[in-house]
């Protein structure tokens, strides 16, 4: 019974808590408009950010008809239902259950729904932190979709540590969200080189966002 009550409260209030916390912050966005520019060219987009600082990017794209990957465990069900309320179309699966099916669904969407947008944390949902899993790069190489690397940081935040440090913005601070240059890979490219390029760019953007938030 207690779990059911917590589940209901999480689903019912989750959207509005996030809206309050992030809506009361002053946003500084670098690269705003890139998604619209890429879509105007018929490009499908993988919006990539590290798991620990996913929330600014997660909310930034919520009004852009995004798809989002969610796991199959209990907590993921809460996250998935909040995401739907925010405007997401969920894709269910994880590295331990339904991963292959989720990957094939992602590739299918990117290939056949031009202008589609999929939000992905390449090190999630279980880490290790800031270590790329292969799916993001492989999906881009196979589908021809653009990867848009991003980084963010809030000047005032709470943090909790599990397999990574997860940040939630406190109200009335500043949020810096940086959208990097789009990355395009083909099936003929070297997978390790592509992976290193994406990881380095994700690291760089998050560190730069952190630097700006500290000023």
Image (cartoon, rainbow, N blue to C red):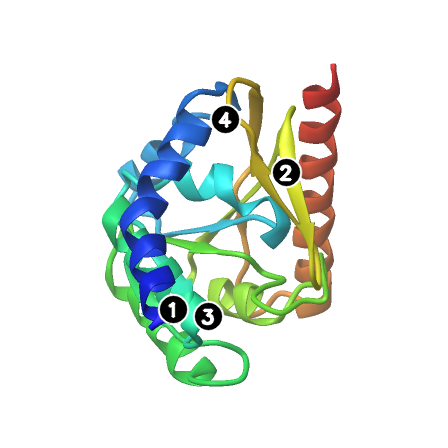
Nearest to the eye among marks 4 and 3: give it.
4
Nearest to the eye among marks 1 and 4: give it.
1
**Would you say the residues marked 4 and 2 are in contact, meaning their CB atoms lie under 8 Å apart?**
no
For the residues labelled 4 and 2, the Cα–Cα distance comes to 26 Å
Mark nearer the N terminus (3 vs 2) = 3
Q: Please tell me the numbered disc located at residue 158.
A: 2
145 displayed left or right of 171: left
Circle 3 sits in a helix, a strand or a loop, which is it? Answer: helix
Mark nearer the N terminus (4 vs 2) = 4
**Is residue 110 in view from this perspective?**
no
**Would you say the residues marked 3 and 1 are in contact, meaning their CB atoms lie under 8 Å apart?**
no
Mark nearer the N terminus (4 vs 3) = 4
Mark nearer the N terminus (2 vs 1) = 1
Q: Please tell me the numbered disc located at residue 31.
A: 4
**Would you say the residues marked 3 and 2 are in contact, meaning their CB atoms lie under 8 Å apart?**
no
For the residues labelled 3 and 2, the Cα–Cα distance comes to 38 Å
For the residues labelled 3 and 1, the Cα–Cα distance comes to 45 Å
For the residues labelled 4 and 3, the Cα–Cα distance comes to 26 Å
Q: At x 36% / y 54%, what residue is drawn? A: 10
């Amino acid at each position: 019974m207690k779990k059911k009550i917590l589940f209901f409260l999480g689903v019912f209030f989750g959207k509005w808590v996030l809206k309050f916390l992030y809506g009361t912050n002053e946003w500084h966005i670098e690269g705003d408009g890139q998604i619209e520019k890429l879509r105007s060219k018929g490009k499908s987009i993988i919006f990539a950010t590290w798991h620990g600082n996913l929330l600014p990017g997660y909310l930034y794209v919520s009004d852009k008809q995004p798809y989002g990957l969610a796991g199959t465990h209990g907590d993921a069900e809460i996250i998935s239902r909040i995401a739907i309320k925010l405007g997401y179309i969920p894709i269910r699966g994880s590295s331990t259950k339904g991963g292959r099916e989720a990957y094939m669904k992602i590739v299918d969407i990117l290939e056949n729904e031009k202008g589609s947008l999929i939000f992905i944390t390449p090190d999630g949902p279980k880490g290790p932190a800031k270590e790329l899993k292969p799916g993001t790069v492989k999906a881009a190489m196979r589908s021809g979709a653009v990867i848009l690397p991003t980084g963010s940081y809030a000047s005032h935040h709470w943090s909790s540590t599990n397999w990574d440090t997860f940040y939630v913005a406190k109200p009335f601070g500043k949020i810096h969200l940086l959208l990097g240059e789009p990355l395009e890979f083909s099936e003929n490219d070297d997978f390790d080189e592509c992976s290193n390029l994406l990881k380095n760019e994700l690291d760089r953007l998050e560190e730069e966002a952190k630097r700006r938030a500290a000023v």
